[in-house]
Image (cartoon, rainbow, N blue to C red):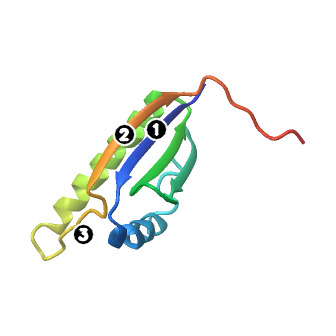
Amino acid sequence: MSVVKINVLTVPAEQREVLEQRFAARAGAVEGSDGFEWFELLRPVEGTDQYLVYTRWRSEEDFAAWMESTMKAGQAGQASHGGEGGERPKPASTGATLWSFEVVQQASPKG
């Protein structure tokens, strides 16, 4: 069965729009990755300042491969900015935690 990764991002109220715009701008960045199955960005409604970034993967190995490629791309991007005033924007979140789960049961609508 699949694995689920939930990145819990603590986002101050004044940074919510920034976070959502950044995710909208990167739309499609993960969808072509081998083993990728699903993505959702969940906005808190009440009682918390934590967004949930939900992704589902075919396997732990697929997720790890995507993370490795993302890290390499990030390092290449930092190198290309090399002090030319192309600083990376500050994070919209003030904290992040990654939760990992294995899917043991699932259901879909009957139709």
Q: Amino acid at mark 3?
A: Pro
Report the front residue among 88 and 45. 45
Helix, strand or loop at label 2? It is strand
Q: Residue at x 36, y 39 (%)?
A: 98
Helix, strand or loop at label 1? It is strand
Q: For mark 1, what is the residue?
A: 5
Report the front residue among 77 and 39. 39
Q: Amino acid at mark 1?
A: Lys
Separation of marks 2 and 3 at Cα, in angstroms: 21 Å
In the rendered image, the quadrant that contains the N terminus is: top right
Q: For mark 3, what is the residue?
A: 89
Q: Residues within 10 Å of mark 3 (few under 14, many from 20)?
A: few
In the image: residue 90, left or right of residue 22: left
Can you tell which quarter of the image residue 91 is in? Answer: bottom left
**Do we see residue 24 in this rendering?**
yes
In the rendered image, the quadrant that contains the C terminus is: top right
Report the front residue among 51 and 68. 51
Q: For mark 2, what is the residue?
A: 98
Q: Earlier in the sequence, mark 1 or mark 2?
A: 1
Q: Earlier in the sequence, mark 1 or mark 3?
A: 1
